[in-house]
Amino acid sequence: MADVSWGPRLDLGAAITESQRLMDHGDPARARDLLEAESTLAPPEELELWQGLWQLADGLERALRGEPAAALSLRRGRDLVGSYEDRPPHALDIAGLLAWSTHLIDELAVTTRDPGWVPPVPRLRMP
């Protein structure tokens, strides 16, 4: 984890909101760092969820950089958040995150992509 000073600790809901803002503005690395740092506030029953969220942000960052390890991070994140689909805390859109990560993994497997291809940004919360 990068050494990031976020100032006062955010509550978990605020961390999700800020992570979405960071990803929307092209900074999934900082979103990942924030989610990882804030995961220490998560109750034990949500620890895998938070680990999965930062893995998904890590996968997005790696996809943006064209790294082959992106799919591995996305699979790890998808597997971790998937168990929360029936009971999504913090109004998270787990079904949407699962669909997004599966789509992005499939896109990364395509060997001939448009050179201007940019991976889509996930929506963390339900609309």
Image (tube, rainbow, N blue to C red):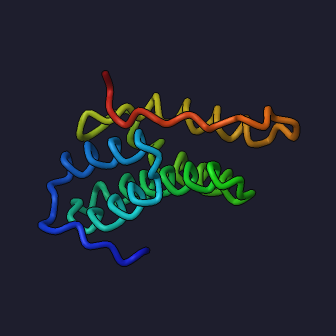
Question: In the image, 79: left or right of 66?
Answer: left
Percent position (x, y) of residue 26? 47, 46
- For the point 26% across and 40% down, the residue is 89
- For the point 63% across and 36% down, the residue is 102
Q: How many marks?
A: 0
Tell which residue pokes out farthest to the bottom in this image.
3
- For the point 78% across and 37% down, the residue is 115
Question: In the image, 45: left or right of 113?
Answer: left
Percent position (x, y) of residue 6? 23, 66
- For the point 31% across and 68% down, the residue is 37
Residue 87 or residue 42, whichever sits in front: 42
Quarter of the rendering containing residue 83: top left
Tell which residue pokes out farthest to the top in this image.
127
Percent position (x, y) of residue 41? 20, 64
Quadrant, the N terminus: bottom left
Percent position (x, y) of residue 66? 71, 53
Quadrant, the C terminus: top left
Quarter of the rendering containing residue 62: bottom right
Tell which residue pokes out farthest to the right in this image.
112
Residue 104 or residue 4, whichever sits in front: 4
Question: In the image, 114: left or right of 25?
Answer: right
Tell which residue pokes out farthest to the left in this image.
8
On screen, residue 124 above or below 1: above
Question: In the image, 8: left or right of 6?
Answer: left
